[in-house]
Image: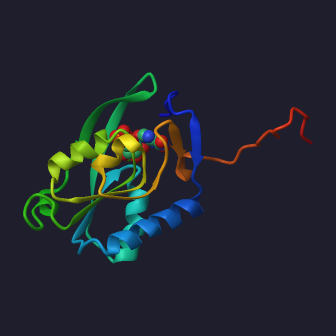
Amino acid sequence: MENPAQDKAFPVSWDMFHRDSRALAWRLSSEGEWKAIVCITRGGLVPAGIVARELGIRTIETVCIASYHDYDSQGSLKVIKPIDPKVIDLEDGEGSGVLVIDDLVDTGKTLKVVREMLPKAHYATVYAKPVGVPMVDTFITEVSQDTWIYFPWDMGWQFQPPLSKETAG
Ligand SMILES: O=P(O)(O)OC[C@H]1O[C@H](OP(=O)(O)OP(=O)(O)O)[C@H](O)[C@@H]1O
Ligand SMILES: O=c1[nH]c(=O)c2nc[nH]c2[nH]1
Ligand SMILES: [Mg+2]
């Protein structure tokens, strides 16, 4: 949910998201041999699909987390579905060789919860805000903390009034 303290807007189109997710895949391709992807639902589902396609990864797992919002700011986090032990146990039981993907890191609270499950995994997001940067290993674009990122799956077409007060039409 939009936060009133994040009054700048960073709208992202499908094309832009696809291009940025491919850029993330490109960067990750030289950072390791990935055995599996764990995507953080729901926002991580879309970039995880794009990265999996680019890198030829076919083992894709979810960790399902819901945040409860209080007055438009992030409240407590609840793990609705944990990571399958088969994925955790792929190598050392701590996530080596596993790529964890989300659409963005903001405060870093979501990644912190998942890092406790897979401390040695590699954490990647498409976008990052400064407070969350220490929690992520690879990201593509940084936006300021007072910016709200608008993802294409949350948006729809709408009439835009002109900048001048003149009535359009
Ligand atoms: O760094 P943080 O402050 O934890 O915020 C980042 C998280 O917030 C959003 O998910 P959200 O909980 O809104 O759920 P969704 O992915 O289901 O939309 C986003 O997709 C990240 O997962
Ligand atoms: O769509 C979103 N945009 C954001 O900037 C954000 N920050 C936390 N959660 C978010 N969700
Ligand atoms: Mg999310």
Question: Which quadrant of the structure image shows residue 38?
Answer: bottom left
Camera-side residue: 125 or 91? 125
Q: Is residue 82 left or right of residue 24?
A: left
Against 59, residue 38 (above or below) is: above
Residue visible at 52% across and 39% down in the picture: 147
Q: Where's residue 65, x and y in %?
A: 30, 43
Q: How is the image coloured?
A: rainbow
Which sits in the foreground, 19 or 141?
141
Task: Name the side, left or right, on which 54 lies relative to 35.
Answer: right
Q: Residue furthest bottom?
A: 56
Residue that appears at 32% across and 51% down: 40
| Location of residue 34 in the rendering, given as x and y in whole percent from the top left corner | 24, 71
Above or below, 61 relative to 28: above
Q: Quadrant of the C terminus?
A: top right
Q: Residue at x 15, y 64 (%)?
A: 96
Q: Residue furthest top?
A: 71
The quarter of the displayed image where residue 62 is located = bottom left
Q: Image check: 119 left or right of 48?
A: left
- Counting every numbered tag in the picture gives 0
Q: Residue at x 58, y 63 (%)?
A: 15
